[in-house]
Image (tube, helix red, strand yellow):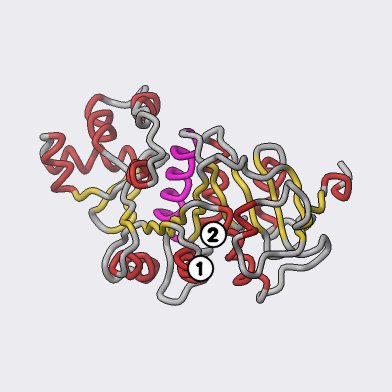
Amino acid sequence: MDTKREVQVITRQEEQYPEKFRQLSDMPEKFWLMGELPPGNAPCLAIVGARNCSSYGENMAFEFARLLAGEGVCIISGLAAGVDGAAHRGALAGGGKTYGVLGCGVDICYPSGNRKIYEKMKKQGGILSEYEPGNPPLAYHFPKRNRLISALADAVLVVEAKEKSGSLITADIALEQGRTVFALPGRVGDLLSVGCNRLIYQGAVSAWKPEIILEEMNWKKGGFSHGEKEKKCLGLASEDDLVYSCLDLTPKTVTQLQDETGLPAGRLLTSLMHLKTARLAEEPWKNYYIRIP
């Protein structure tokens, strides 16, 4: 398909121009769009975080987005590598809509590794940019576009961020815009968790499970289905099934899992090894375990 024919130009004089952008003191005069804009009354969450995220951060971004998108929440991010891409993938997997705000022209997929996501988003959401088609992804574009990511959203979730991170710029802008800021708590001493833990210390809402966001934003629809665990456990040995049913998105220690399963340490560790081999569980830190979506 001819990309040029897919691109719309929306100016601030048009009715289609988002009301949320009009609230910005430096609103763009116009922007380019492929796909569609989020519906005006739809709940929107921006998910941002480190490009070089951990596998734990990637899994969390995917799973939060998947579950929230399934509840009708539009997921917004920047289509970058790492957390951004995982959030978009999660929203698509959840059957929801997701929107990318780019630091280059909408006709450029950057990074190129996100091409499949990019193509799906044009049909299951949208891609927009204040930079004219053909504009390359220059470094100074990205901090500026962050204000549009948070402006489109009602709230922002930071998944992983180092002490000095572009995601923290987005969080600061979001606060200035009156948005609610959530942060995924991380392990003390983990460089990728310093930014999130600091945000929580400064007053951001600690989002250790997706339900917290739904409740805090009053987006609750009746909760998530817990049938996914049972579906994934088909074919597992009974003890492996038991251990998997106790795993969650929040890391649990071996001691916690022993208390919940009642299994001796040796048998518990054997089941955890089986689940890791089957890519149903992961050990993000030593002796801490999570389920893999």
Judge by depth and name the residue closer to the eye, 101 or 27: 27
Q: Residue at x 46, y 34 (%)?
A: 71
User: Left or right: 32 with respect to 64?
Assistant: right
Image vertical order of residue 143 relative to residue 70, above or below: below
> What's the magenta region?
53-70
Residue 105: tell me if it is visible. Answer: yes
Q: Residue at x 28, y 48 (%)?
A: 289
Q: Look at the numbered disc 1 and give the secondary structure of its residue.
A: helix
Name the residue tied to disc 2: 150
Name the residue tied to disc 1: 173
Residue 82: x percent and y percent? Answer: 53, 58
Q: Look at the numbered disc 2 and give the secondary structure of its residue.
A: helix
Image vertical order of residue 227 relative to residue 4, above or below: above
Disc 1 residue type (three-letter): Ile
Residue 47: x percent and y percent? Answer: 49, 54
Disc 2 residue type (three-letter): Ser
Residue 28 painted magenta = no
Check if mark 1's residue and mark 2's residue have beta carbons within 8 Å.
Answer: yes
